Image (spheres, rainbow, N blue to C red):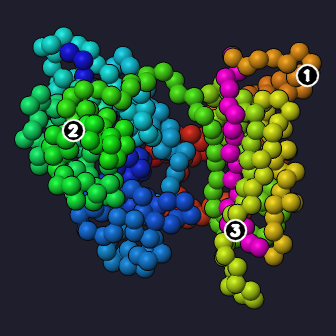
Amino acid sequence: MKMTGLLDCNNFYVSCERVFDPLLEGKPVGVLSNNDGSCISRSNEFKAMNLPKRLCYYAIKDQAPQLGLIFRSSNYALYGDMSRRVMNILADMTPVVEQYSIDESFFYTDFKQDFDLMEYGTRIRKKILKWTGIPCSIGFAKTKTLAKIANHIGKQTKEGVLVMPDDNHSILEKLPVTEVWGIGWRLGEKLKKLGIHTVLDLAMQDPATMKRHFTISLAHTVFELRGTSCISFDGEPHQSKRLAFSRCFHHPVTDLQVIREALMHYTAHVGRKLRMEGQRAACGVVYLNYVPEYYPVELPSGYTSKLVTFTHPTANSLEIGRQLAAELPSLLLKGRRCLKVGVIFFGLESMDRQQNDFFTDTTKNEQGEKLCSIMDGINRKFGRNSIFTLGEGIERNWSMKQNLLSKRFTTQWGELLEVR
């Protein structure tokens, strides 16, 4: 019996916060976006209050105590590590896993016809909850699209697990078409004008007609809703085609040194990802975003960028940072305030498949990559940013606002949970 499963952690960011602060249980809790902007993860208690989905923190913070709302800043170090733990448990219990996002993973099953998928899913769910404290839901179906729907329904059941039956018309006819994976409200409105209101309505459409009027992806979705798999299952380790990182400053800046520190820090972050995937980058882009100005002269928001091609593909983030930082003076517009600096690596290729250049001396580059790898190992052992380059800055007053940040309980020695 070949089936696709989807594991989805419930209210993941909030659940991670609750693991290490039990006092948050049963309370309306929201996790904020970068710079404590808007609410991006809400507990069920928060959702029950019928507040706007992307509620801005500044608009509600004064009323939060009276409403009983509790907010936390995004703690990506904690969430990333908890995600890794959840996915490792899943990988131990199922043969092939394809992580879809930080809190979701597809997994492939191929058991005997009489295998009890309900019991299997319940066992996975209980083990993850016991070992990590993270609640999750699981859906099983013949295709990824149907597994998404099964998971959505299973999340609302007491068991937290649903196996999509072969005869699923009674289930699909109750769901709006926007519940289908990949169909947003804009496409949903177009489909409704054609009389396609429910998931079952879409499943009954002619795939060729959907392809002709929309896209081949929608035609594939129709096949998937009928139980024919069209979305490939990739259980192999993923290698990115590009890597990027950017953050808004705590407040707009004009100091070139501050921008350079942020760029070096972001380059080190992306370089670490590059080495984790065993890849090298052939070129990189550094860009600056500017805030609009209203006095003394009105100016719109702006954008400047520069593409830098490296001498040869490299994973040496120290050298990459040096080359990208050299372009900053020409990018910083006089009199403009910078809102964000970002970096993108392009032209990625595997270290194992890279073609060596007989006429180029790569000794210095290889030494730089080894140094970066040593720094990676130290930071893995003793916690992120245990060692870093001076060019990244020490105080980092430019970093994004996180006034409600919890501790990094699982990745920083100095922030381990204390039991007294």
Magenta stretch contains residue 123: no
What kind of secondary structure does the magenta stretch mostly adopt? strand
Labels 2, 1: front one:
2
Amino acid under disc 3: Gly
User: Is 263 left or right of 12, judged from the image as shown?
Assistant: right
Helix or strand or loop: what does disc 1 sit on? Answer: loop
At 77% from the left edge and 47% from the top edge, which residue is drawn?
307
Helix or strand or loop: what does disc 2 sit on? Answer: loop
In this figure, which residue is indicated by the disc labeled 3? Answer: 302
> What mark, if any, has residue 360 been given in the picture?
1
Span of residues in magenta: 336-352
Q: CA distance from mark 2 to mark 3?
A: 46 Å
Decide which of 90, 411 is in the foreground and name it.
90
Disc with the residue nearer the chain's start (2 vs 3): 2
Q: Residue furthest bottom?
A: 296
In this figure, which residue is indicated by the disc labeled 2? Answer: 206
Helix or strand or loop: what does disc 3 sit on? Answer: strand
Quarter where residue 300 is shown: bottom right
Decide which of 310, 80 is in the foreground and name it.
310
At 37% from the left edge and 43% from the top edge, which residue is drawn?
215
At 30% from the left edge and 63% from the top edge, which residue is drawn?
46
Amino acid under disc 2: Asp
Decide which of 329, 257 is in the foreground and name it.
329
**Neighbour class for label 3 at 10 Å: few (<14), some, many (≥20)?**
some
x then y, percent, for residue 178: 26, 52
Could you tell me if the residues under marks 2 and 1 are in contact, i.e. CB atoms within 8 Å? no
Q: CA distance from mark 1 to mark 3?
A: 39 Å
